Amino acid sequence: MIRRGFQAAARLGHHKALPGGPHILPRFSPASAFGSSTDSLVSRFCPEKTDLKNYALPNASWCPDMLSLYHEFLEKTKAEGWIRVPSFKSNRDHMQGLKLPLGLPVTSDKSDWRIFTRCIETEGQGYEYVIFFHPSEKKSVCLFQPGPYLEGAPGFAHGGSLVAMIDETFSKTAYLAGEGLFTLNLNIRFKNLIPVGSLAVLHVDVEKIEDQKLYMSCVAQSSDQQTVYAKASGAFLQLQLEEDPSQ
Amino acid sequence: MIRRGFQAAARLGHHKALPGGPHILPRFSPASAFGSSTDSLVSRFCPEKTDLKNYALPNASWCPDMLSLYHEFLEKTKAEGWIRVPSFKSNRDHMQGLKLPLGLPVTSDKSDWRIFTRCIETEGQGYEYVIFFHPSEKKSVCLFQPGPYLEGAPGFAHGGSLVAMIDETFSKTAYLAGEGLFTLNLNIRFKNLIPVGSLAVLHVDVEKIEDQKLYMSCVAQSSDQQTVYAKASGAFLQLQLEEDPSQ
């Protein structure tokens, strides 16, 4: 019964169903439900001062291409409006003081929770990445270097690891660009394999925001832009994070 | 130059391009290129005796639902033609004595490579899963229990972790059902979130095999079949693994 109850609560179901189900989400007016300014969303997710470890900083495992592009974008944060998105161990850290909508429970136990794309702590073995976001242009760039624990075909990143990286970049972009919270769908066409240890650059654009949904596109390619690794599109559902009265 | 050379080799490019590119793959006749029987593919990928650790066996972290369904399918391996697919640390272990087609290099260094879906060794923290395959019906069932390192929204599995699990189940199914090797595309519609620590059952079917491609579908749902987590489809490219003369 406990499990059943948990599943029922977790379900975005019944009158809270995701589109496509038999029931329709309550409609919000953009002014009331999605009135948070990009500035306030950014300041909430990208605190300048925090004691939390930021995993989106260079380490010794980063390849020269990744370091070089990182510093290039860091320069752009000074003059061209780009923002370096911090990356904490768990989305719980990004959401401090907030709770999920639709009655989804957030357990507050002390388990060692990690966001999937930071599941491997050893530098260089798993996901190395940093996301830069441009608020006014509603676009992001993710520098992604897959390590040897992300392997699929020998020597190459697993397609699923790239999809997860795209989903995570979509996710942060969707939230910062318009309170997009839940992935509704993803479509990925794979073109070439990414060698483990090399850099893939993900260019993400918000194509449109319509009917409570953000539509995004992604091109993942090599740093010299000569090799396209994958093209993807996805849609996210807009939902507001609510203040958590218990905190 | 080394990096560029590596990328060029990794590319399924030029006259070896994936469909959609400017060049077309050489056509093979099914008799010559894909003549391996399902039995030989299964015996190659599912050796009965090996010293390699099989990660697809029950451990103390498996929830009662997962254990129960595991034993149910284990019974079906005795009478109903199902096969329990072993899961080694790396695809290199599954491919012993074979090499990738298209000149893709497989480095033979002693790095700690891991298949992405076995990237976290601590039992219960990351991916727990086992795949059962039915050769004559060309379908699979994957029992998947996401751990707390696979989190997206607090308390729930990251969408990307589910996609990677679907891709991996597609991948093993595609190979065993018809030498499908490379993911060409994936399309996923998310319906509900999977609570961390609970069981998701992935039902995968090969819909058709046509023009060197395997087309597959997947429904991921709760064990009581009351909650659909996601529906997916994907296409894989058929390519033969070649004998490795160096071994």
Image (spheres, coloured by chain):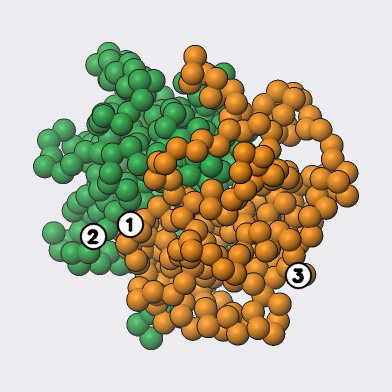
Chain colours: A green, B orange
Where residue A194 appears, x then y in whole percent?
52, 33
On the same chain: label 3 and label 2? no
**Chain under disc 3:** B
Q: Is residue A114 above or below residue A83?
A: below
Dot 3 or dot 1: first in sequence order is: 3
Cα–Cα gap, marks 3 and 2: 41 Å
Asked if the residue under mark 1 is in contact with the one under mark 2, i.e. CB atoms within 8 Å, the reply is yes
- Amino acid carrying label 1: it is Tyr
Cα–Cα gap, marks 2 and 1: 8 Å
Q: Secondary structure at mark 1?
A: helix
Q: Secondary structure at mark 2?
A: loop
Residue at (45%, 63%) from the top-left corner?
A: B53
Cα–Cα gap, marks 3 and 1: 34 Å
Q: What residue sits right under mark 1 in the picture? A: B149
Q: What residue sits right under mark 2 in the picture? A: A112
- Amino acid carrying label 3: it is Glu
**Left or right position of A162 against A113:** right
Q: Is residue A16 above or below residue A217?
A: below
Q: Which mark is residue B137?
A: 3
Front one among A18 and B49: B49
